[in-house]
Image: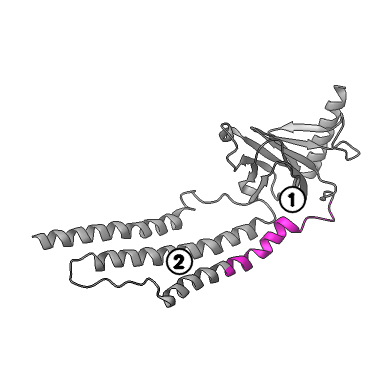
């Protein structure tokens, strides 16, 4: 009876451990159908960001399944009582080389896979469009706990009485590469628009150029992805994407309303 109980315990523990990779992989496969996956991207570089994500995801998934499979086997195989002596692997140079070389190889694959996406998002800023690093569409300021966009006056100046400032909502044109400068007025924040696949930290003391090209008109969530204080949870805004003509009209109306108050 004691042997039966021990076998039952081994089987129970083994099945519980086996449930971890099975449920994990099953959840991943069904996530999109359950609407637990990423929202569809609406930016020009969204495809490259998602491609890099899937490269890493497949690596993690395969490693996870193999690791959990070995764990299940070892628990079932070696939890039984016996007189076998333990095999110590400390100082086994072959094993150490293997489990050092494999992660190193995976890191090299990730490093080469991310080069194009990194260059596109962080280095290859638009140079031929209406907005460039030298002449951005706007400046965005993060502070505890809001977002503010400042649009230059008609001469391109960001200082003066005719600078349009909008809180919580950022308005940009559709199908146009938009460049803006990201600033923080206090602590570390992070500008994150999930549907653009855009995330950039706002660092105090730095003016960081950021760019994106929204490919579909609409209103999209803007959140802070860096814990920035007690009100971090409510530091949310919107990015409103308008067709070019509607954006030009909106900006003209904002400037006209501002001048009318002078």
The answer to whether residue 205 is left or right of residue 103 is right
Residue ranking furthest to the left: 1
State the image coordinates of residue 14 (x, y, percent, origin top left): 27, 61
List the residue tagged with mark 2. Answer: 62
Give 90 or 192, whichever is nearer the viewer: 90
Image quadrant of residue 95?
Answer: bottom left
**Residue drawn 49% across the image and 49% down it:** 36
Q: Is residue 85 above or below residue 206?
A: below
Q: Within the image, what quadrant is residue 116 found in?
A: bottom right
- Tell me the quarter of the image containing the C terminus: top right
Image quarter in which the N terminus is found? bottom left
242 vs 35, left or right, is: right
Q: Secondary structure at mark 2?
A: helix
Q: Is residue 88 left or right of residue 252?
A: left
Q: Position of residue 124 (x, y in %)?
A: 76, 59
Q: Along the line of sight, which residue is nearer the eye, 138 or 33?
A: 138
Q: Residue at x 72, y 37 (%)?
A: 141
Magenta-drawn stretch, dominant element (helix, strand or loop): helix
Residue at image mark 1: 211
Identified at 25% across, 65% down, the residue is 76
Query: Could you tell me which residue is drawn at 55 percent across and 51 percent down?
Result: 38
In magenta, the rendered stretch is 108-129
Q: Magenta stretch: residue 102 in it?
A: no
């Amino acid at each position: 009876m004691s042997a039966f109980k021990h076998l039952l315990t081994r089987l129970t523990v083994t099945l519980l451990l086996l449930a971890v990779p099975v449920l994990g992989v099953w959840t991943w496969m069904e996530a999109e159908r359950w609407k637990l996956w990423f929202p569809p991207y609406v930016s020009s570089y969204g495809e490259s960001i998602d491609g890099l994500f899937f490269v890493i995801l497949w690596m993690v998934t395969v490693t996870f399944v193999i690791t959990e499979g070995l764990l299940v086997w070892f628990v079932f195989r070696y939890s039984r009582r016996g007189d076998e002596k333990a095999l110590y692997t400390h100082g086994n140079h072959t094993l150490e080389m293997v489990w050092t070389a494999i992660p190193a190889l995976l890191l090299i694959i990730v490093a080469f896979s991310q080069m194009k996406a990194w260059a596109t998002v962080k280095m290859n800023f638009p140079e031929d469009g209406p907005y460039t690093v030298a002449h951005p569409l706007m400046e965005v300021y993060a502070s505890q706990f809001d977002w503010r966009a400042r649009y230059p006056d008609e001469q391109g100046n960001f200082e003066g009485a005719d600078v349009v400032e909008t809180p919580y909502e950022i308005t940009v044109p559709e199908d146009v590469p938009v460049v803006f400068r990201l600033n923080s007025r206090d602590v570390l924040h992070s500008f994150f628009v999930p549907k653009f696949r855009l995330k950039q930290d706002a660092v105090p003391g730095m003016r960081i150029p950021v760019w994106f090209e929204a490919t579909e008109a609409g209103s999209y969530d803007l959140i802070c992805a860096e814990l920035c204080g007690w009100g971090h949870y409510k530091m949310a805004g919107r990015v409103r994407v308008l067709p070019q003509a509607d954006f030009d009209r909106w900006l003209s109306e904002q400037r006209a309303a501002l001048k009318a108050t002078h």
